Image (cartoon, grey):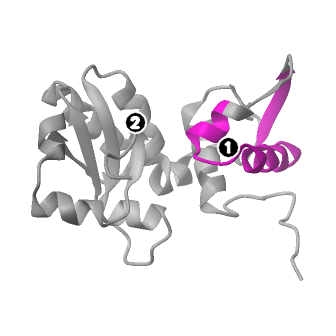
Amino acid sequence: MRTEAPLLAPIFRSAGQARLLAVLVLGGDEIGIPELAARANLAYPTAHREATRLVDAGILRSRRVGRVLQVSANPHSPLTSPLREILSVATGPAVMLQQELADIDGVEIAFLYGSFAARVVGLEGPAPNDIDLMVVGSPAAEAIYQACDRVSDAVGRPVNPTILTREEIAAESGFLRDLAAKPTVPIIGEVPWN
């Protein structure tokens, strides 16, 4: 027999819901459900259902703009501030890195890999000590390092970037074969071998 999540705190019901919360609580934007579903990598019906639950609980607020339901974090909810802290550490690195890297010219693809990515996709194991980030393109390395430092400070874990060109990511190597066989979490663009 399945029971309903408590109305007062229907949070962390799934990894998808945690991503949805991270997009809204850490991103700070008011966005429509279609864009929310895309950013959180969820099917539209799932994003709509989870957002509705969180609106009903007062964690999110909503309004209609035409036919689109717009949602955002509710700044008046007593849960918003603690959620922001928890999400920053648990799922926030992906959202924060997406925001940071989106403003850097030359970033074509970015994704997480390693133990942090494995935990995000639900594989069991010890808590990760750091976050491994792959950046593909031709960005200014210093801009990438500065962005990673800002995210590291916010989430309390070092973010270790590896920067490769398109040619380097397409080359044959043991490292890349191993990387392709393990979980990744897309940040910008699509992972080359997915």
143 shown above or below 193: above
Viewer-nearest residue: 50 or 56 = 50
Residue at the location (71% across, 48% down)? 79
Query: Label 2 amino acid?
Result: Ile
Where residue 114 sits, quadrant-wise, is: bottom left
Residue at the location (14% across, 30% down)? 141
Does the magenta stretch mainly form a helix, a strand or a loop?
A: helix
Kindly tell me whether residue 165 is visible in this rendering. Answer: no
Mark sitting on residue 116:
none
Magenta range: 35-64
Which badge, 2 or 1, comes first in the chain's sequence?
1
For label 2, the crowd category at 10 Å Cα-Cα, with few meaning under 14, some 14 to 19 and many 20 or more, is some
The image shows residue 157 at horizontal and vertical percentages of: 32, 54
Mark sitting on residue 188:
2
Is residue 182 left or right of 11 when viewed as pictured?
left
170 shown above or below 98: below
Callout 1: helix, strand or loop?
A: helix
Seen as rendered, the residue at the extreme top is: 66
Is residue 178 left or right of 156 when viewed as pictured?
left
> Mark 2 and mark 1: span between their CA atoms?
26 Å
Residue at the location (71% across, 58% down)? 11
Query: Label 1 amino acid?
Result: Thr
Q: Which residue is mark 1?
A: 80
Callout 2: helix, strand or loop?
A: strand
